[in-house]
Amino acid sequence: MKQRKPLSMTAVLVVVITGVVLGMVLCTVALFLNAYRRSILRSAQTSSRQAVDQVSNTVANYVSDMDGVMALVKSTLQTAPQDSQEREEFFDNLLKIRADVAAVTTYDAAGNLLSCWALDHQPREEIYENLSFDAAALSLYAEGYISQPHVESIFEGWYPWVVTMPAALDAGGPEAWVALDLKFGSISSYINNVGIGQHGYCFLMDQSGILYHPQQQLIYSRLKEEDTAALAVRSDGVYSESNVIYAIKTVEGSPWRVVGVSYVDELVTSNVGEVTRILVLSALAVLLAALLSSIVISRALSRPLKGLSGAMRQFEKSADRFTYAPVGGAREVQALSESFGHMVVKIQQLMDTVRREEINLRKTELKALQAQINPHFLYNTLDSISWMCEQGRNAEAVQMVNALAQLFRISISKGHELIPIRSELRHAESYLKIQQHRYKNQFSYRFDVDERCLDFLCNKITLQPIIENAIYHGINGLVDEGEIVITLRAEGTDVVFTVADNGVGMDQAQIEAILRKERSDHTGIGIKNVNDRLKIYFGEGYGITIRSEPDEGAVVTIRMPQVREEGDYENR
């Protein structure tokens, strides 16, 4: 029987997702958008018109009320004699009853101030500018006028925000004009409290521009703009522009116009029931389609892909010990699984090959460095013994030969690269004894050792090249007796040697030159040799650092990890 081919991932995605989910979602969205558009426009236009009509009627009533007050003021000014008690009592009562009237002023035919009534406030003796009354605008005042909001400027220390309503008086006396300064706060506070949706608002304007805006500070700082020029040429009505709806209404009895600004996407209120029903049906349809799709996709794609993904994560964590079991599923997933299995085998083979090559290369480099330092040290020591023999100091030469034999027994260490620190310290002490024979009474040495570190392992012949450098290049040039101090301490998980001398020291350029000596050099290669061996064996975080100043001696620090068994690092 012919084996049935598994479904392809492409066929599953196209048939299930495109045929079921996309079809249902498109139908649902089309119905929703149609109802939503009609509902949002109808609701937004109605709300904006109602809010603007309410503000306009309130402002018109206020203006009408002020017209009544103006008529009463004009009647009193024309009937009561100037400076009479009757006139004073009238204005005093008016200002107390109508707290929104800031001041009442009269002017002669030339626009000069004659009288002023304001509770507890007197006009300045010298008025530099009267923002409430402009003598150059008398012809405009005669036609009926309400000024833009401005600061009352004729009083000392009192600057209320007002609008001015001027009116002409009948001829026959010196008083030709009267002006009511009305506090604008009553109008502005009402406008501030009117909102259309969450972010909609109303503002007041005339042909010259904005009179009051609830976001006045943003307007002044140019963080917000209103296209008043375009609004000024439009008649009263409702206008829709993109997502914004403008409702405009002229205030009866004044040149002011109320403009309402609202946003379409905030005013979805009237068709909530219809939209909710459509959304619920749409959500159920999408949920059903998603459920059916998820069942099919989970069986055909999700499970095998999750298994393959988990296998990849396990391979990343432990590639060398990973064993892969192929996963099933759609045809494409099976092909991917087989390819991943082949890749795992190849990578593991390559890792084994690279690991063996790295181990061989490291061992070769270590042996080359070790072979380099042994002849260098032997040459210097034999040179010292030869010098003693020439000087007839045969007994001392014998002692040096015995010390040299003991030193080489330690350095051989049965072929091990790492030796106990206690052996390395004996090796260093043997070398110091040899050199003391040659440089008798020229230097002394001492050890300061933390005995807890003696059983840790270190690279053999680590201290000797450092001590050699301190003797030949530091103490050898001294007139006074030199001193070498070898210190051993544990720092965290590391072991730190320091070799300090009181020699001639060196500058930074000399320090850098010592640490980058090439292997072909014949002087000073010991320190770089030790540094290279430490880094090859333990890593770049370990090695040698040198701190020195001319005529201040030198301190060489050797850092290596705490190692108890050579196998801990020999294959790294």
Image (cartoon, rainbow, N blue to C red):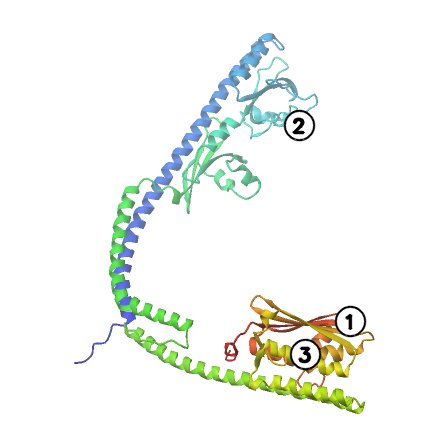
User: Is the residue marked by circle 3 packed among few (<14), some (14-19), or many (20+) residues within 10 Å?
Assistant: many
Q: Which mark is residue 571?
A: none
Residue extending furthest right? 479
Tag 1: amino acid: Pro
Mark closer to the observer (1, 3) = 3
Residue that mark 2 sits on:
129
Q: Residue at x 26, y 57 (%)?
A: 24
Q: Secondary structure at mark 3?
A: helix
Q: Secondary structure at mark 2?
A: loop
Of callouts 1 and 3, the N-terminal one: 3
Of callouts 2 and 1, the N-terminal one: 2
Residue that mark 3 sits on:
429
Q: Say if 127 sits above or below 472 in the image.
A: above
Going by the image, does 307 lie left or right of 292? right
Residue that mark 1 sits on:
550
Tag 3: amino acid: Glu
User: Is the residue marked by circle 1 packed among few (<14), some (14-19), or many (20+) residues within 10 Å?
Assistant: few
Residue 179 showing in the rendered view: no
Report, in whole angstroms, how far the alpha carbon at label 1 lies from the one at label 3. Answer: 27 Å
Q: Residue at x 52, y 78 (%)?
A: 566
